[in-house]
Amino acid sequence: QVQLVESGGGLVQPGESLTLSCAGSGESNLDGYAVGWFRQAPGKEREGLSCLSSTDTITYNANSVKGRFTMSRGNDRNTVYLQMNSLKPEDTAVYYCAASEFISRDSVEYFYWGHGTQVTVSS
């Protein structure tokens, strides 16, 4: 069982940046896992944003965030980041990280999930 904890959410104004973090907690460690970032806005389906393979050699970014969001893994191999630039009000959602053995754009392929962190973009 892998336990994930997201952090870094908050309230920002349009055009600002925010960096989310996802780390394995306790005895969990994200090293060796593919990680994905997803979000869900009220009344909308969960949306896949970005994913990174276990070896960090394969990445994917959804068209809605391409050029604005960047995913990376820290040197500790246990922390994965989502750098979000040029934020828009439509980016407002609860953001989740998830881990799996293999990289996938489909949320159903991810077995381990964090509890989410709220991102609100508003003036």
Image: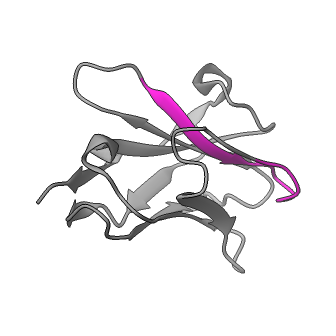
**Residue 12 coordinates in the image, percent (x, y):** 22, 65
Q: How many marks?
A: 0
Q: Residue at x 53, y 47 (%)?
A: 65
| Residue projecting furthest to the bottom | 75
Give whichever of 87, 107 is nearer the camera.
87
The answer to whether residue 57 is left or right of residue 123 is: right
**Residue 49 coordinates in the image, percent (x, y):** 55, 41
Q: Residue at x 81, y 52 (%)?
A: 54
**Residue 55 coordinates in the image, percent (x, y):** 87, 58
Q: How is the model colour-coded?
A: one colour
The answer to whether residue 71 is left or right of residue 39 is: right
Q: Residue at x 22, y 55 (%)?
A: 121
For residue 93, what is the image quadrant? top left
On screen, residue 121 above or below 13:
above
Q: Residue at x 25, y 61 (%)?
A: 14
For residue 23, what is the image quadrant? bottom right
Looking at the rendered image, the quarter that the N terminus falls into is: top right
The answer to whether residue 58 is left or right of residue 13 is: right
| Residue 105 appears in the picture as rendered | yes
On screen, residue 94 above or below 17:
above
**Residue 74 coordinates in the image, percent (x, y):** 66, 75
| Residue 25 appears in the picture as rendered | no
Residue 53 lies within the magenta run: yes
The answer to whether residue 94 is left or right of residue 36 is: left
Looking at the rendered image, the quarter that the C terminus falls into is: bottom left
Give whichever of 7, 12 is nearer the camera.
12
Residue 22 lies within the magenta run: no
On screen, residue 54 above or below 96:
below
Give whichever of 38, 69 is nearer the camera.
69
The residues colored magenta run 46-59
